[in-house]
Image (cartoon, helix red, strand yellow):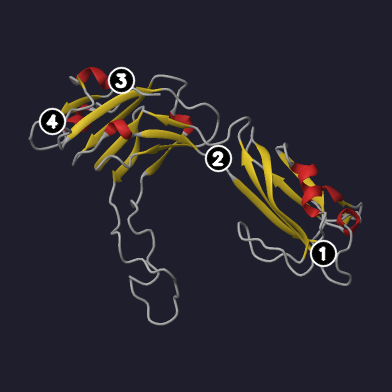
Amino acid sequence: MVLSWRRMVLDLEIGLKGEFSRIYSPEYQGSAEWSSMQNDDTVSPFTWFKTMFDAPEGNGPVTIDLGSMGKGQAWVNGHLIGRYWSLVAPESGCPSSCNYAGTYSDSKCRSNCGIATQSWYHIPREWLQESGNLLVLFEETGGDPSQISLEVHYTKTICSKISETYYPPLSAWSRAANGRPSVNTVAPELRLQCDDGHVISKITFASYGTPTGGCQNFSVGNCHASTTLDLVVEACEGKNRCAISVTNEVFGDPCRKVVKDLAVEAECSPPSVNQEPRYDI
């Protein structure tokens, strides 16, 4: 959605008249005179901007991209998001490899060269209404508010690694008459779950045996059941959540007398959506 911006340029006087007048609040919009902003307008320092927007669909966390702005503060419906300052790190100075051994210095293992220190800021859903939300910015140095956008975030990658020697799931536990806990003899379970309303769209890794590595870095070990991926895909893809027993009875025994793990990595997606929605303001 593309919305129109309005602005108010402050006179050079002591104090922040806009903050004193609370022009960032919906109840005090009548206390300031705003002028419409054109795309080719030059943005001056110490300028207030405002626009209205509708809340993005869904229940996922909402963020606003202020990377096109300089330095200032932002409010949504009278709530202060916080200060923003779009500083970009120097292009050079990041080593191609990192090793923390030896004497420490502030340049050791430096990363994110050429990237802004922060551009995304969280807007709590509790602050938003379905439509007619007020966004107000106080810009101190200059920027381009036409490039500001909203984005809905969700968990894109989920993963788990469970050993066949782990405890059974909680559903198998109970409390005996003497007060001591007891447990049925069932296999441990690997469970996956996406955000509410989202589904497991793809299994990117699955291995029952001796997989190595961690989440987003799994690899097949020396012992691997070749049917693992097909079984996990059948059990999980297209569902919001799934549970798989970690046992030879499900996957077979690819290596006898070896303790085996089940490692799975999956992608989550909103229903019928290939990428997260992005909303221009």
First of labels 1, 4 by sequence position: 4
Whether label 4 touches label 2, CB < 8 Å: no
Classify mark 3: residues with Cα within 10 Å, few (<14), some (14-19) or many (20+).
few
SS assignment at label 1: loop
SS assignment at label 4: loop
Q: Nearer the viewer, mark 4 or mark 3?
A: 4
- Residue at the image position 68 percent from the left and 43 percent from the top: 202
Whether label 3 touches label 1, CB < 8 Å: no
SS assignment at label 2: loop
Residue 108 in which image quadrant: bottom left
Q: CA distance from mark 3 to mark 1?
A: 61 Å
Residue 9 in the image: state x and y as whole percent.
Answer: 14, 29
- Residue at the image position 66 percent from the left and 61 percent from the top: 218
SS assignment at label 3: helix
Q: Nearer the viewer, mark 2 or mark 3?
A: 2
Q: Which residue is mark 2?
A: 154
Q: Which label belongs to residue 10? A: 4
Q: CA distance from mark 4 to mark 2?
A: 39 Å
Query: Is 14 placed left or right of 79 in the picture?
Result: left
Q: Which residue is mark 1?
A: 165
